[in-house]
Image (cartoon, rainbow, N blue to C red):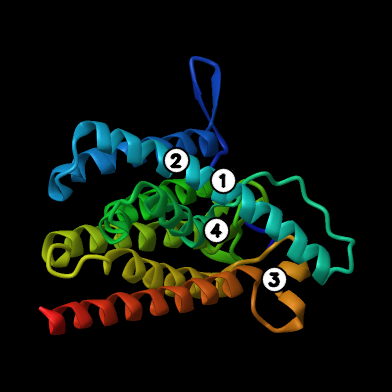
Amino acid sequence: MAGSISVTEYKMKPYFYINSIAINMYNFFFAIALLSVPVVLFLLRKRFDFSVKQAAVYSGFTLAFGLVAAWITAMLKQAMLSYASGGTYTNNEKLRNYGIPVFLPIFFFIYCLIRKDDFKKVSDYIAPCVYMVMTFVKIGCVFAGCCNGGPDEHGIWNAELGDRTVPVQLYDSITSFIIVIICIILIRKIHEKHPGYIYPVGGMLFALTKGFWEFFRIHPTEYETNYLNTGLTLWQYWMIALFIGCVIWLLLVRRKEIAQTGNA
């Protein structure tokens, strides 16, 4: 338990030093996560017949919408936990990334309505980069020691707690990257025949995997771990909402697809 396990070569450190310069590993991987957005979208642009300019525009809006989504999520987290705690909960967190899959398509839907773009095509296009961001951010969490799992003598050293814990953030990163691969495979296999499927499928997979890993998480407050005394964490409720929303989204896309095929 805490204090009984010695620090070994497996200790994860929040900083990496190069020539006495300290590099914050969470910030480092957060920067890589942001950079991954244009990289993924530029690599996929030919598959969607987008120009370099279009790829740059969608990259910019994905980053902007994503940051706004993360900010809204942090604000809603504060409001929800304040309600659950009777107003005693306070937190200075500015960004929370788990709301990105929830809010990003809403922003892009409005954008596509205004620009008269094909939302199904655009949502398929941006889907992989959403979970690529999650992949790198969670690697940063591994080094920072945030998003803690429970004590586990076979786990990895948690720099924040001073103990070995279940590497839930690493598992979360791995499953997010698997979703990236699945999205790319689906883009190659079904996008042209079934546009609009990729994002909701990725969202459902993320909701299921993230919701599962939450059972191994230990949050800073009981209000977040056992939200409203229901036995579920705050973020599991978010994942339930994401899953239901993506199921409805997929059913609507499928219904429209059948209607168009029947009218053809």
Q: Which of 165/70 is in front?
A: 70
Q: Earlier in the sequence, mark 4 or mark 3?
A: 4
| Cα–Cα span, label 4 and label 2 | 14 Å
Mark 3 burial class by Cα count in 10 Å: few <14, some 14-19, many 20+: many
- The crowd level at tag 2 (other Cα within 10 Å; few <14, some 14-19, many 20+) is some
For residue 99, the mark is 4
Callout 1 crowding tier (Cα within 10 Å): few <14, some 14–19, many ≥20: many
First-in-chain label (2 vs 3): 2
Residue indicated by mark 3: 225
| Residue position marked by numbered label 2 in the rendering | 63
SS of the residue at dot 3? Answer: helix
At label 4, the amino acid type is Gly
Q: Nearer the viewer, residue 150 or 102?
A: 102
- Tell which residue pokes out farthest to the front in this image: 263
Q: Badge 1 is on which residue?
A: 68
| Front in this rendered view, residue 86 or 261 | 261
Instruction: Name the residue furthest top.
Output: 19
- What x and y, as percent, mark residue 253? 30, 74
Q: Is residue 244 above or below residue 113?
A: below
Disc 2 to disc 3: CB gap under 8 Å: no
Q: CA distance from mark 3 to mark 1?
A: 25 Å
Assign a secondary structure to mark 1: helix
Q: Residue at x 21, y 77 (%)?
A: 257
Q: Residue at x 56, y 45 (%)?
A: 68
